[in-house]
Amino acid sequence: MVKTKDSILSDYQNNIKTQENRITDLKKKLNKISFSRLGLFIAEILIIALIINIGFNPILTGLLLVPLLLFMVLVKKQSAVQEELTYAGQLLWVYQNEEDQVLFGKNGYRNGDVYQDEQHPYSSDLDIFGAGSLYAFTNRCNTQKGMDLLAANFSRPNDKKIILDRQEAVQELHSYIDQTFHFRAELQNHKPEQLKIIQNKLKYQLPEQLLFTNKRFLKIYLKVVPFLMLGLLALGIILGGVSWQIFSLVAVFNMGLTFFNLKNINQVYYGFTGSSNLLNAFSGTIKWTEEVKWNSPYIKNLFPGQQASVPVSSQIRQLSKIIQAFDARLNIILSAFLNLFLLWDLKCSVNLADWHGKYANEVLSGLERIGEFEELIALATLTYNQPEWNMPSIADHFHLKTSALGHPLIPQGARVLNDFSLNPQPTVDIVTGSNMAGKSTFLRTIGINMVLAFSGAPVCAEEMSVSIFKVLSYMRIKDSLNDQTSTFKAELNRLKMILDAIKISANSLVLIDEMLRGTNSRDKYLGSKVFIEKLIDQRTPALFATHDLQLSEMIGDYPEQVRNYHFDIQINEGEMNFDYKLKHGPCTTFNAALLLKEIGLTLN
């Protein structure tokens, strides 16, 4: 059954209610546990008071253990419920974010402003990165790897095989959309940089930092020390005297051994502080990817080599347990006791070295996989949330044909759809029209849907068939006081970038909106005409939006190489109406006089 936007929104809202109810129930359960713990604490106090009043009694003394044991059980139970509550909150955020996206176009993930680049061939002109951008609309990544991958795939076209493989992968993940929400929830409360820190630690730092654990005496002594200390403690209790002195000497030796290696221990631990919860989250996300029998080649390639005898998710969980044990050093009193009797920090370091030798490479590969899946999940979520969008077909040779093509960042209710196709041979399509009639938006509609298509994502169209183009745009040209660059110089720089690029790439597509705004009208016309002739000579297809009707007359000299399109307005009783529909031929109706009249200026 194909879902509609209304049914998708309804599902999100039902999931939100389910999580809100679950959070309410879990909070009630936590309150009951807290009251039970208080009751057990009071019971323990009362038993102690009875023993003080009555005197030693074997039964009362035995009863002392009951509240203590029950208290420990409740502490463990409370920790588990708190984890459930935290996860439910994270999952609720995921569903609420999707509701906000469907209703208001808002997205709580990062908007990609760090990837903005005015020198990029198209990203600034087509609103690919930053507030209100395609990236802001699409991103569902919370790791640096995932965000970088999504930015990379929006920044250049992939080849045909990769696009088709990615389309298949996105559609397969779309069929697991409910599981992807849980995948994202696991990672929700963690900063993108944390995974990178752990990866750098495992790959570059630990191999050298763990060298001190390779001493044979140290490994043997660590195995013996628990039994040695327990035996000396028993002897001290039974025999006293010299036994206590020996016990004290061994304890001092243990402390000295820990202190002697403290610098190395601190280096090993740095970067893992408090990361056991994060590693557990990574283990949970990877476990799901291991349990599914994937069909798409693109996803299968994310699992290199033979299947590990121990799943990567289990390997990460083992690392998490080692780090959790290592975290005992955060409690000074507990750390002192454990190091005194068990050489705890050294034991954790040796355990980490053993783990690193067995599993580090496989785990590094698994951690990379998280970002790869996140990036695909972002596109799968886009596919799910936009059921009216479709996967484009990718042609082998020069081709573009669209049906009901719209701008993906314009809300569905306000979006106007147009059909557009290129001729079998490259042409320069001159688009004339009034101010605010839709010329610039149409150019961006073509470009931004190509960006989606070449990334392996669905496009905002009923149908789109396209060959792979290198998109080059000239739209928002800015001057720069810092670089002492005037608008006209900035325009010339952009034109040179386009001319240099089309010499290299035979598959270029140029999108130009009102060329040479920084010079006089005569030079603007002549410069535009010469540039169009250069594109014709290079057989480079282009869409050229302009107010200059003279350029539309070039069709007389180049009937096979130039096509005219326009966006017009309808004027009824002095009111302007825009339909934003692309029409053939040059524009005959303009609105500058009406717009000037609205501010008190009349053209004679």
Image: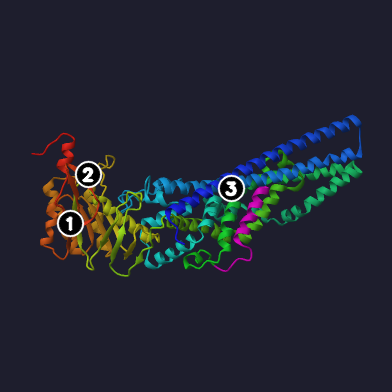
Q: Is mark 3 on a helix, strand or loop?
A: helix
* Residue behind mark 1: 531
Question: Which residue position is annotated with label 3?
Answer: 87
User: Mostly what secondary structure, the magenta segment?
Assistant: helix
Disc sitting over residue 77 in the figure: none
Q: Earlier in the sequence, mark 1 or mark 3?
A: 3
> Disc 3 marks which amino acid?
Tyr
* Circle nearer the viewer, 1 or 3: 3
Marks 1/3 in contact by CB < 8 Å: the verdict is no
Q: Where is residue 309 in the image (x, y as percent from the top left)?
A: 63, 66
Q: Mark 2 points at which residue?
A: 487
Badge 2 marks a residue whose secondary structure is helix
> Start and end of the magenta stretch?
305-326
Seen as rendered, the residue at the extreme top is 53
Q: Pointer 3: residues within 10 angstroms few (<14), some, or many (20+)?
A: many
Tell me the distance, in whole angstroms, between the alpha carbons under discs 2 and 1: 18 Å
Query: Of 554 and 491, which appears nearest the observer?
Result: 554
157 left or right, relative to 559: right
Q: Which callout, 2 or 1, points at the residue further toward the start of the chain?
A: 2
Q: In which quarter of the image is residue 28?
A: top right
Is 293 in front, or is 88? 88
Query: In the image, what residue type sits under mark 1?
Result: Phe
